[in-house]
Amino acid sequence: MNVQRIALIASLLIFCTNHTQSHAPSIEQSVINEIDKFVTHAHDQLCAVEKMIRSLNITFSKDSRFSALRKKRAQEFFSQLIEIVENIKNANLRNADLDTCQMLIEFNHNVITLIEKHRKTKFKNVHTFDVEQFLQSLTKKRTLSGEDVFRKFQRGAFLIAKIEREGVGLTRKNRLARWFDDTIITPAERYSLPSRLTQLVAIPALCYYLWYRMDHRLPLHAPTKATKDRAYDRDNVYKTRTGFIGKFANADDTFSDALKGDSPVLHYGGAFIIHGVLQELSKNAAPALAKRFRIWLNKAKGGAYLKEADRLEDKAKKVRFDDVHGQTEIKRYFKFLVDYLEDSETHERQGIRPSRGILCIGDTRTGKTFCIEAFLEEVNQMLLSTGQIHKYTLIKPSVLRIQFEGMEKILHDAKAKAPCILFIDEIDLLQLQRSGENRTLSEFLTAMGDAVNSDDPKKQIFIIAATNCPETLDKALRQPGRFGKELRFEYPNYTDRLQFISDKVKEFILPEQEKEFNFEKLALYTHEKSYESMSLFIKDAMLKAKIDNNGQLTQAHLEHALEENIFHIIPSHAKTIPGNEQEILAAHFAGQAIALALLESNLKLAKVTIKQVMTKLEEKAMGSHLWNADHKEQQRFEYGKLFTYQENDSINMQTRQEKINLIKLHVAGFVAEELLLGSCGFSCHAEDDHLIALNLAKSLTFKGIDEVKLPKHMVKVYYDEAEALKEQCVQEVKELLTAHKQSLKAVSEALLEKETIDFDQVQELL
């Protein structure tokens, strides 16, 4: 921000706070009596203006029709307005005098009018808000009546609602098209008016046809000699007529001759031909015309409907490799495939031929399908830039279609559309294993080799499959010549998460606000989370900000959304928990939080809560509870949980001391209950915590050997050592928490008050 802008904003604030009477206009007594109310309304409208500016900035920045330069100029304009608005709000002008009321009313009116002016021109020529000219306009003496105040408020509220509703670029044509769609098209489709109108037209046409035959006494069967004589006499009369009437009579006679054919076969044959033509038109032409009409209507409606028009025209934004975060090695391999497809003949002569069967392996939502779509678009863009006429298409047959039609039929269709990429998602659902007579597996094994081993450069087929259960596939499928190349997808690491979160959040904020966010903290807390999960909690945070009055996205909104969508903390209790039970929860998790904060471990404290938390349900077969005698109902949620993160992309390698510290962590909750409440009932996560602590101790005493493989006397010895180690950890944790009993009590009270606290708050209490 330059020095001139700082001076202008400072002069505006000085004008607001000093309330210079020499520049004050005269105001009617009716306005003076309610000056406090008008100042409050003006301040509230100022907040609405700020919310409108932020919303308009996001809407304009996401519109693909405008250039980057125009978006940059508009963003600078919005940044200046928000800076001035925030400075005025920080001056705390609610309890101000007449000058402030006048300033706020005029400022709101001028800003809203300027935004509406630029909005109509789609921010083609952006003029910044001139603060100096605004101050000079306030020095003019004029009377501010109650009608003026009401009119400005009403006009401002109307324009704010209009701008938020219409956004940028909605013209009169767009509004007319939307009215036409809402009042005519939608009701017509709802009540099937086109088909009913067709019936209404067909029935009168049939009636007219029957009446015509009766009026001219044309029989429905072959004509007799009498009817032929009457037709002959009528023909002679028509031939004597001239002019328009004669031509019309001759045309009517021609139509009559066509209707009164000599044989009923002509009638039935003509009807059959007409029926076939109409059926063919309804099958092919009608959907195409309906699609073109929907495209035209969406373009005419404008705004968000332009995306639907682009989708119908296949002009929607395609993903490229630049849109794929992380997956560096996988993108390198796909880039090589693009180079190979650009000049496959040269590579073939050099003996370089990549596998055309690719198996993508990875956990769910790790970006397998997204990366395949980016690869397809890169191939098509390469072909477009090199002027090649053969364009690759993406064929995505469903598992149900493969099971119904068979793999041979699918590969036959792929050969007809070659060159193409055949993508089979969730291939494990085909159950390609050697169990009984598996027709799909046999077809896969026999037909896949012919498809991927074609030597015709113009008929190449790449078969790409994706699964998160590769162990369910037959090993013959994962051999060279079939799915010979395996690409492994993983959840993003810390660097990729940080880049993704920062890029997504920057879409909803102004550049000056970036310093207010802690992207590193959010990236640490989303360990082992997919891009889809991170995108979901950012959108949810924006929704929370939109619900607020100003609509400004903050770090608090992001953390609250992260708690609900990543940590799965339920915001409000479904039950009214008694105070003594809340004290048990607070004491238990306060002890664990203090222990984790003080002990050395590869796990770091993120948040601790005593609210309801959704548990991770174990997947089971349907109806397993009917035949499983040991079936136990899974808990859908639990009360209280400790959330941790790892500073680095760890593979969970731990030293002996780190494992001992983890044992102390899991028993610290029970020790804290004894210190703060005088006793422990072992009712808060007792089974889970004790079992985890005992297993950690056994992993040390058994030295990593499975107890099933050891003699019984050695198992008992090692088990006694594990119990002794666990009791030793209990005594050491008791000494640690006793030394920090005041901090333990403070953390427990903070949990009772706030229910959820993070590491920074725990560190302050320590």
Image (cartoon, grey):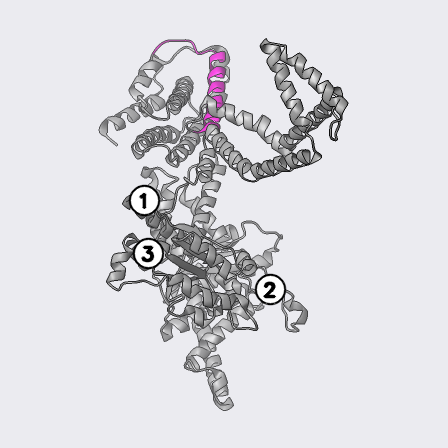
Q: Which mark is residue 384?
A: 1
Q: Which mark is residue 634?
A: 2
Q: Earlier in the sequence, mark 2 or mark 3?
A: 3
- The answer to whether 396 appears left or right of 190 in the picture is left
Quarter of the image for residue 221 reads top right
- Between 264 and 34, which is closer to the camera in this rendering? 264
**Residue at the image position 26 percent from the left and 64 percent from the top:** 351
Whether residues under marks 1 and 2 lie with C-beta atoms below 8 angstroms apart, the answer is: no
**Amino acid beneath label 1:** Leu
Callout 3 crowding tier (Cα within 10 Å): few <14, some 14–19, many ≥20: some
Q: Nearer the viewer, mark 1 or mark 2?
A: 1
Q: Is residue 758 visible?
A: no
In terms of secondary structure, where does tag 3 sit?
A: helix
Callout 1 crowding tier (Cα within 10 Å): few <14, some 14–19, many ≥20: few
**Amino acid beneath label 2:** Gln
Quarter occupied by the N terminus? top left
* Residue extent of the magenta highlight: 140-167
Quarter occupied by the C terminus? bottom left
- Between 506 and 291, which is closer to the camera in this rendering? 291
